[in-house]
Amino acid sequence: MLSVLRVHLPSDIPIVGCELSPYVLVRHPDKTVSTDDVPESSLVERHFLRYKWYRIQSDKKVAICSVHPSEQATLQCLGCVKAKIPVAKSYHCTPKCFSDAWQHHRVLHERAASAVNENGNEEEDIYGRFNNTTSGMNNNNNGVGNNNNVVNGTTPLYPAAVTQRNGGETWFEVGRSKTYTPTADDIGHVLKFECVVVDSETKLPVGHANTILTSRVIPAPSPSPRRLISVTNADVAGHLDSSSGTFTVLSYNVLCDSYATSDLYGYCPSWALSWPYRRQNLLREIVGYLADIVCLQEVQSDHFEEFFAPELDKHGYQALFKRRTTEVFNGSNHTIDGCATFFRRDRFSHVKKYEVEFNKAAQSLTDALVPNAQKKTALNRLVKDNVALIVVLEAKFSNQGVDNLGKRQLVCVANTHVNVQHDLKDVKLWQVHTLLKGLEKIAASADIPMLVCGDFNSVPGSAPHALLAIGKVDPMHPDLAVDPLGILRPATKLTHTLPLVSAYSSFARIGYEQQKKRVDPNTNEPLFTNCTRDFIGTLDYIFYSADSLTVESLLELLDEDSLRKDTALPSPEWSSDHIALLAEFCCKPRTRR
């Protein structure tokens, strides 16, 4: 007979908006064991599995610490209450917790004090806007408290029921599918999952029910909103009106799930490293920026197909993907990451796609320049599976004026992830140079603005950064000392003709002091875009062709105060070890020829 051997949850800490998917081990009548579901529509000898979820609601109210959401709160900040800050952010578990978090917490007070503008309206933050959407990411609109019916899982709606009352506890039935997504109504409460074998004829349970209890449900941590800062007048842009002829570009290394391990990021809670949690947090963030073009790096192949592409499609984005090549990687093809570029269909149309495989370029290079006896050594050094995705888009808007009516406005967007190995300085520089030479050919064939985005794994002042930012590399640059294959000689060939400028260098030219403090005065680049316990520095950039584009606004940078005192990235608030970069551009009117 069908029987359940074991049930357990990958994580016993449930988070609002993060789907719970129990592991259910089943023994079939033929003695085989599997984790396959047995629904009523696919009976096994007249039996099926029935699932139920309950919320155990105690008469005693429980508040959750805003900093350590797995801990019960013991004190509340009355300043938050007075300032009408969301009450969940006012709770702390210990006086030390409150003291350690003060640098971050006081920002909430300061923003609350300045949140009312001259017209008496609340100022809108770019990142915070997603909280008001009606997408699947809004956890506040999917609870029993907002609806007289249970809306969870894939089963039809049915009335919410009080199952039983035991002492000071009441058990509410909240779901009837194998999976369950906690809602805001579940915060502070324990959930119970029940799985039982049912006779299809009598509809009665057969044998005992297998159950498991979770910890108390915690709210999904939310980072402080990041605002869009105008670099033309240094004012805060409350919201973005991209219908005016401007467009926005986001670049973000989202941290591939294969790399998000406790071995590498032991300081991050395991539940915050889990993919079910991170994917929802990342999607909330990405969708909240409302970018017209989105360039993501470290997107796992199966996650692109099963999550990013379909979810962003719901928000009006078309998706393109280039997976890393597999000559070096020996794992599953499904977990190989790559570069993904998305664009809003109402703003752009797809014209052409180019895929750059640096491995193929390495093969061509060694065939042409390296003696046969050294080819194997050369390929071992150069073949690193990195790629770039170049997309040519046509704008569906125009700011070109009457003289240029009818002319197509094209934009070329390159999205890349350069090799990470610190000792391979020659390989990094060669990959960047190869990409730029490819972009030069595209620029020569059309009058087209260029955007070069990605994780270049190169700090400001390095040879790859110099090549991108100033179009050449000083022959005496120390990075050129690492060139065992001679692929960088002569140094005079390390040039390009694209008029590229780093978008975030615009912060150094404006009077917005808060942002200037977050920029390195020597390089005019952010102080960091990657922040772990082992490394803090800038690796990510958005470059643009300054002869055809101007920067209008930039997403504000994070600083040490924006991150909690005792953490690095990733964290419960930010689900990647990199931060997102976003720039708003305007196409310069083209002169008549």
Image: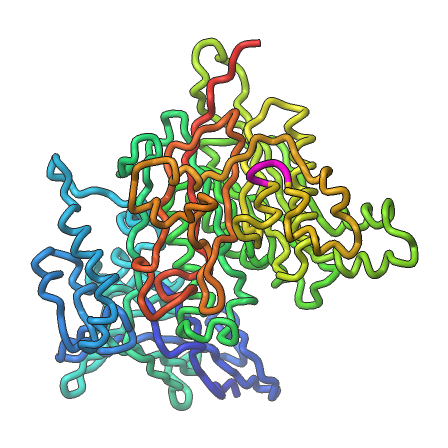
Q: Which residue is drawn at 29% across and 55% down?
A: 224
Q: How many labels does the image show?
A: 0
Q: Where is residue 1 in the image (x, y as percent from the top left)?
A: 52, 88
Q: What stretch is highlighted in magenta?
A: 468-472
Q: Which residue, as the protein is rendered here, is positioned at the far bottom?
A: 207
Report which quarter residue 277 is drawn in: bottom left
Q: Where is residue 559 in the image (x, y as percent from the top left)?
A: 34, 55
- The overriding secondary structure of the stretch rendered in magenta is helix
Side (left or right) of 21 relative to 31: left
Q: Which residue, as the protein is rendered here, is positioned at the far right?
A: 372
Q: Look at the image and tell me whether residue 81 can be seen.
A: yes
Q: Is residue 17 magenta?
A: no
Q: Is residue 206 above or below residue 477?
A: below
Side (left or right) of 107 relative to 402: left
Q: Where is residue 256 in the image (x, y as percent from the top left)?
A: 54, 61
Quarter of the picture holding the C terminus? top right
Which of 40/253 is in front?
A: 253
Which of 89/378 is in front?
A: 378
Scheme of image coloration? rainbow
Q: Where is residue 429 in the image (x, y as percent from the top left)?
A: 66, 48
Q: Which residue is drawn at 38% across and 52% down?
A: 285
Q: Look at the image and tell me whether residue 313 can be seen.
A: no
Q: Residue at x 46, y 47 (%)?
A: 312
Q: In this view, does 430 lie above or below 345?
A: below
Q: Is residue 404 above or below residue 577?
A: above
Which of 443/374 is in front?
A: 374
Q: Residue at x 36, y 25 (%)?
A: 244
